[in-house]
Image (tube, grey):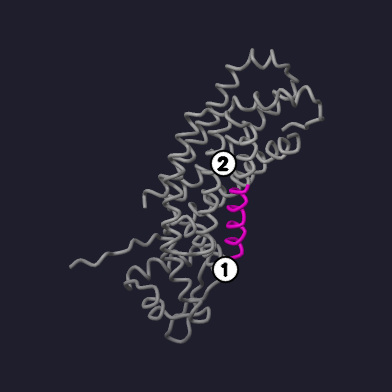
């Protein structure tokens, strides 16, 4: 579990950096073309990046405090609130993606006690209701991306479709994380794969011309 | 029967003009640009004046004829526009 946990924690800042890179490129596109949908895409990826980064920083900070199980229970409400804020930010990003389609850790030292507390502590960040909402919105975004790919089959459209599909699957795993905690880490890794698909698309695009 | 008229952004029009100049070998007369970029004479004159002021195009006079040549900045704009276009197309966003 430790290795998986470490990868899933590190996946968040990496995903955030990729998200900011895509957001930056969308903004560049907006400045040149004045296309409003590119601005919505920019806002969506920047908000998603901020949400991922905030969760990583907050989690890293709480981890550095080396909470015992009792202490975690004491600040559970605050973590829940933080989780609600992060999930809401993610949700806002997904809404922006859907609108753009519609308008046409801190170092882990291997301390067993700390790690034993981690899964349940990390799980509080995820709000099932907001995960369900994210799933519904992402389902719509994936459907639109699929239609786009079918009609305008292109390598970059396929990469965008795969990226959003990974986001969708990751939220499906987050939703069922209360049943099996390993799904949470698996979800993080799948989400990272989603960002990697976007990064490949961005790399292909920047080689154009 | 009404024909649907596709909206072209200012950047798209600039790209079409510059791309037409590239297709003509980096130097083209107004008539060739006019047909290639699908613009009226008045609109072309207005856009060319803006492209010159932006340093994307330079005007060259040869006897009584006028030619428009692409600058390095103009070439860089075309390349950047193509990248942005590929990016936007991946998300189904027309520009």
Q: Residue A170 bears which disc, if any?
A: 2
Quarter of the image for the C terminus of chain A: give it: bottom right
**Label 2: chain letter:** A
Q: Residue A209 bears which disc, if any?
A: 1
Residue drawn at point x = 72 percent, y = 33 percent = A105
Task: Say whether residue A203 is magenta.
Answer: yes
Task: Assess disc 1: are there few (<14), some (14-19) or many (≥20) residues with their C-alpha within 10 Å of its C-alpha.
Answer: some
Residue drawn at point x = 47 percent, y = 47 percent = A39
Residue sitting nearer the eye, A32 or B27: A32
Up the image or down, B68 lies above or below B8; here it is below
Residue B46, how many percent across, how many down?
38, 66
**Label 1: chain letter:** A
Q: Which residues are magenta?
A: A193-209
Residue A85, how many percent across, how many down?
53, 27
Up the image or down, A43 lies above or below A65; here it is below
Quarter of the image for the N terminus of chain A: give it: top right
In this image, A185 relative to B92: left or right? right
Prevailing SS of the magenta stretch: helix
- Mark found first going from the N terminus, 2 or 1: 2
Measured Cα–Cα span from mark 2 to mark 1: 34 Å
In this image, A67 relative to A136: left or right? right
Residue sticking out furthest to the bottom:
B63
In this rendering, the label closer to the viewer, 2 or 1: 2
Up the image or down, A145 lies above or below A44; here it is below
């Amino acid at each position: 579990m430790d290795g998986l946990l470490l990868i899933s924690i590190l996946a968040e800042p990496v995903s955030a950096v990729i998200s900011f890179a895509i957001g930056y490129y969308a903004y560049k596109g907006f400045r040149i073309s004045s296309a409003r949908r590119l601005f919505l895409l920019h806002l969506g990826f920047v908000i998603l990046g901020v949400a991922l980064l905030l969760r990583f920083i907050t989690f890293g900070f709480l981890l550095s405090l080396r909470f015992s199980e009792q202490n975690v229970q004491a600040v559970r409400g605050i973590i829940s609130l933080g989780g609600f804020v992060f999930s809401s930010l993610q949700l806002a990003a997904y809404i922006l993606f859907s609108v753009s389609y519609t308008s046409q850790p801190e170092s882990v030292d291997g301390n067993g006690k700390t790690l034993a507390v981690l899964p349940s502590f990390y799980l509080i960040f995820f709000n099932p209701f907001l995960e369900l909402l994210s799933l519904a919105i992402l389902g719509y975004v994936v459907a639109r991306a699929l239609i786009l790919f079918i009609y305008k089959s292109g390598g970059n459209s396929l990469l965008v479709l795969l990226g959003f599909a990974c986001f969708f699957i990751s939220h499906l795993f987050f939703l069922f994380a209360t049943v099996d905690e390993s799904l949470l880490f698996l979800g993080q890794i799948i989400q990272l794969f989603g960002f990697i698909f976007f990064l490949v698309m961005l790399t292909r695009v920047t080689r154009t011309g | 029967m009404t024909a649907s008229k596709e909206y072209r952004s200012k950047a798209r029009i600039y790209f079409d003009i510059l791309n037409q100049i590239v297709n003509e070998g980096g130097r083209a007369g107004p008539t060739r640009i006019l047909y290639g970029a699908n613009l009226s004479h008045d609109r072309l004159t207005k856009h060319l004046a803006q492209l010159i002021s932006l340093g994307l195009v330079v005007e060259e006079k040869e006897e009584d004829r006028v030619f428009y040549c692409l600058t390095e900045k103009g070439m860089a704009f075309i390349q950047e526009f193509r990248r942005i276009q590929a990016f936007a197309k991946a998300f189904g966003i027309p520009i």
